[in-house]
Image (cartoon, grey):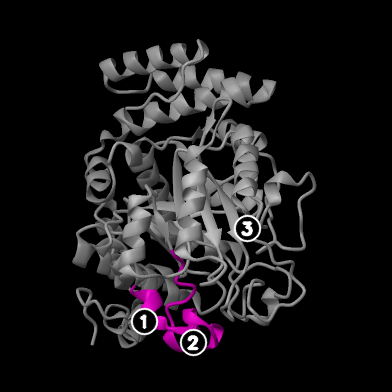
Amino acid sequence: MYNPKSLKAEEFISHEEILDTLAYADANKDNMELINSILAKAEERKGLSHREASVLLACEDEGVTERMYALAEQIKKDFYGNRIVMFAPLYLSNYCVNGCVYCPYHLKNKHIARKKLTQEEVRKEVIALQDMGHKRLAIEAGEHPVENPIEYILECIDTIYSIKHKNGAIRRVNVNIAATTVENYKKLHDAGIGTYILFQETYHKESYEKLHPTGPKHDYAYHTEAMDRAMEGGIDDVGLGVLFGLELYRYELAGLLMHAEHLEAVHGVGPHTISVPRLKRADDIDPDQFDNGISDDIFAKLCALIRISVPYTGMIVSTRESQAVREKVIRLGVSQISGASRTSVGGYTEEERPHDSEQFDVSDQRTLDEVVCWLMKMGYIPSFCTACYREGRTGDRFMSLCKSGQIQNCCHPNALITLKEFLEDYASEETRKIGEEMIAKELLTIPNEKVRGIASKYINEIVDGKRDFRF
């Protein structure tokens, strides 16, 4: 029985409801009257239901796709301006007790080098990331009750926040670890984490259980209900995601949007972010074994649909994707990207990118400076801002700021201030030159005169050596 307000996984992600939705979408994929009404609703910036989005996904009319893309681009501009938030993953440990068939960290993989960072190694990794210019990390670890208990994760978070190196500081630590208890989520909240991220992998229960044959992750309900426990534990910002390529993408989009609807119905606030990873090659994993891979065009359509369905939610695309694909989907709604990522434990302190312990192949292997320069050449402001989380603007408080349009007087100047820090401390000559021109131009677009004046003052003070201003 489908019930978005239920706390039971199989009721708020109802298999029958998804099948009915897909049948409804197939029956109406050429119903232009309905499709036009759905697009008109999307234009009101109030979002779409899983059923409405599924109709647009099933529709193959090129004109409809173009309208959808234009709308996604406009909604992105309305709510996020031309900012792109930067982050990097930090892998703490690849010890794992699960048997996930698509991940090289699975328990039976005997030829991957197993490693867990000591606190001194965490320190070295963080300094390497700070020396690039990163201010926001997403920490990752395999599920292992002995090697990676919650105490280890908390100690690592404490270490990360404690490191002040030259002008570097990690100001926000997002956490991507296995589903856990309300008590442990409270501990993560008290440790000052930003967003708690957990990918569902697939919302198809039968497929989920086959793809996770052994280990605690096998429990579909416990995994799917994790976000409710996280919010009960006081974490305001949670991040959803599916691994596209494991199951049929139309099923996944419906499930993903149903999960967002459930969080809104129960907690009054939807997901802070949605990630859109695609299955990639890795040690011991051949993506061709999975027959649900999606093309770049379908991937772009999914990104645009997520943007118009959940307009206030941040969208993340990682270095799994190539420069060309990232270029396309940034325009269609992506608001956060990683830069210079290494997906192996201890990878940032090694001169050569290590491949023997990567979780997946990294398609975009450019440096952070190169990624920042590329974004600015396309007209985007690379933002290293973490102000909302540090000012307590999380959960529904962030959403109300976003919905009211006040982000232009808050996030926009914060993006320019943190970009100025990057230019002063880390940028190459070319990047600095492009960045200075961009800041001068973008300051003029801040609508509030007082905010504009304060932002200019802060930017001048950064030149004098001061750091960490925020609105």
Residue 427 forms part of the magenta stretch: no
Q: Which residue is mark 2?
A: 209
Residue 264: x and y in percent read 23, 62
Looking at the picture, tell me which residue is in the foreground, 43 or 371. 371
- Give the SS element for disc 2: helix
Q: Which residue is mark 1?
A: 221
Assign the C terminus to one quadrant of the image: top left
Assign the N terminus to one quadrant of the image: bottom left
Of circles 3 and 2, which is in front? 2
Identity of the residue drawn at 38% across and 50% down: 191
- The mark that comes first in sequence, 1 or 2, is 2
Is residue 283 at all visible to an observer of this figure?
yes
Q: Is residue 102 left or right of residue 6?
A: right
Label 2, residues with CA under 10 Å away: few <14, some 14-19, many ≥20: some
- The mark that comes first in sequence, 1 or 3, is 1
Q: Against 141, is 237 above or below?
A: above
Q: Is residue 167 left or right of residue 284?
A: left
Circles 1 and 2: CB atoms closer than 8 Å: no
The region drawn magenta spans 198-225
Q: Against 49, is 402 above or below?
A: above
